[in-house]
Image (cartoon, grey):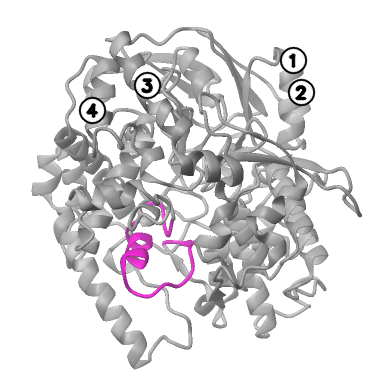
Amino acid sequence: MYGWMGNVLRVDLDKQKVSTEELDPAICREYIGGKGFNSRTLFKEIRPGIDPLGPWNVVCLATGPFTASGLTSCSRVEVSTLSPYSGILGDGNAGGSFAHFLKKAGYDQIIICGKAQKPLYLWIEDGNVELRDASDLMGLSTWETADILYERHGKDISVAAIGQGGENLVRFATLMFDKYNSAARGSGAVLGSKRLKAIAVRGTKSVSLADPDEFRELAREDRDFFLNDPFQKEVVAVYGSHIGMLHWAPGFRNYEKYLSEADVPEALKPKAWKQFETGRSACRSCVVPCKNSFRIPEGEYEGEAGKALEYECIFCLGTNCGITEPVPIMVQENLADKYGICVIALGNAIAMAKELYMRGILTARDTDGLALDWEDAETQIELVHRTALRQGFGNLVAEGMYSMAKILGNKAMDYCYHVKGLSRGPHPAGIFGLAHATSTRGADHLRGRSWAYGENDPSLWPELVEKGYIPVEDEVKTLILSEQVTTLTDMIGRCKGAVNNWASAVPLVSRYPLLEGVARLLRAATGMEFSEEILKNTADRVYLLEMAFNVRQGIRKEHARLPLKPGLAGTQAGDLELAKHEVMLDKYHTLRGCKPETGVPTREKLESLGLGFVADEMEKVPGSPGRFEEWDGPVLWDPEAYPKGTRRA
């Protein structure tokens, strides 16, 4: 097989058994890889209504056909599961070197099921796979776990590990790759529930290509763009995602407002972070060093060092929580990485808790005496510890924003600006709000929003618009195109880039618009016939499969909501916003091949995409036998039923 290794590794933790399954070439053609493989597996193997933290959940890790091929920016691993944070599709995408080593070990996908009787870790060395005792790793951070496995197996490996957050089933715990790369949406908690502490992999095999000469030439053209493009060289490679603090309007105090460039504190602007920078790095196979390394030079945390501080941490654990000094943000970044918890979900939960505290909905009695004042960075750092260890009020924060609001009641949900349990804050009706509403993993910035109006492509995007490749005159069509692109990017194993732009996500888009470059690369890599039309249909196949997965979890049209602030809800202005959103949502569902009144994919559309087996499942929606219960977040546990504690990071 060309492009793919042709193997799926199945890990049954109940039986402590590993086995290898052959990858069907037809599945490769129809789902390509990455999230395509994973989303199909989840739909096939996860029953609706199960507890995400129960033994019946499944975790998948997958690479793409371009992984370890020599094409730049293609070392992303897709991690997918039923999210214990949202109760719907939960997938994350991480960089580093894990995907590279997994592919070279001979595997395109890992499927993990069941629950181990004792703590284990998975060791993969080319074709040799073992489940090993991990009792000595329990209670350790992701950093400590990785260091022990590097020492045990050698430096030429990659390690994916959970920390204390995953062990304590913090619902937004994440799987961390080589200490600093996160795959969010709750995969860490699911692996914690399964008692799988880590995966370590060494791979030395080669990836066979159908036309290596043609592929190498195309890969060279793609690499040369990044080496020569002024924006990539002078902005992305210098500041990475920190430029978002100037251009992406970060939230402030639980989205009290969005900060303009002039509003952003000087200490949090891109150039200010340079005083802490000790170097820059890139993921495996990438030529753009978008990630920073940092060190705190003085004060209480003098000498503390970390890596890959992104915009999301500065915004979510910084400004949106009222913290405007850099040192506490760096400290929290390191704690989140060590504990293995998502900075976005953590920041959203703390920001909402702070607003509830300011409004008297939460009191010091509820928070175990913690005064959740906006500017109090030290108390917030303490709350991060308590959340990861599920201690005191942290046990509630560990449930995540939506579940915490549901548990609290008393108007707490009014300040939970979520879509399907995840948050990007309240936005007016329009393409951004619609993108958050239609995202298949809840409100999200990487399913479509960042691709809509090209704010991160100063030269290429206007050219693509001028030549008619992007239909900006129609916001709904533009969003659907961007969803197709981001879906395809996560299938081929490509990075969307530190600043989420078309050139990063779509190989060779500057030379062969729009998806022709991807088609050429796939033909050269795999020997199979691909075209732009085939690729768009493939992306639609995966996206509608994900929509159908969520339908089985109880998602309906009304859950594709437009969050409004309490002061706007119920007013004439608020009603106008909702009406505008409703019109756009109806058009979106119609163009997507879904019933506009329910948001459920139609049989006709599903069968046209080769998803007849999915159409059969959709017959069970409301009004049909075996209807699925309406979504209201994940199955919750008694607060005292969770594991708690272990050592503070």
Measuring 45% from the left and 12% from the top, which residue is drawn there? Answer: 106
Dot in front, 3 or 2: 3
Which element is circle 3 on?
A: helix
- From mark 3 to mark 4, how far is it between C-alphas? 13 Å
Within 10 angstroms of label 4, few (less than 14), some, or many (20 or more) residues?
Answer: many
Q: Nearer the viewer, mark 2 or mark 4?
A: 4
Given the image, on which type of amino acid does mark 3 rest? Ala
Residue displayed at 43% across by 52% down: 456
Q: Which residue is mark 1?
A: 152
The residue identified by callout 3 is 219
Please indicate, yes or no, whether residue 433 appears anywhere in the rendered image: yes
Q: Start and end of the magenta stretch?
A: 420-444
Image quadrant for the C terminus? top right
- Give the residue displayed 77% in from the left and 51% down from the top: 331
Label 3–label 4 contact, CB within 8 A:
no
Among numbered discs 1 and 4, the one appearing first in the sequence: 1
Which mark identifies residue 148?
Answer: 2
Mark 1 touching mark 2, by CB under 8 A? yes
What is the C-alpha distance between the residues marked 3 and 2?
A: 36 Å
Q: CA distance from mark 1 to mark 4?
A: 42 Å
Instruction: Please check the rendered image and state whether residue 421 is part of the magenta-colored stretch, yes or no.
Output: yes
Taking the magenta stretch, the answer to whether it contains residue 326 is no
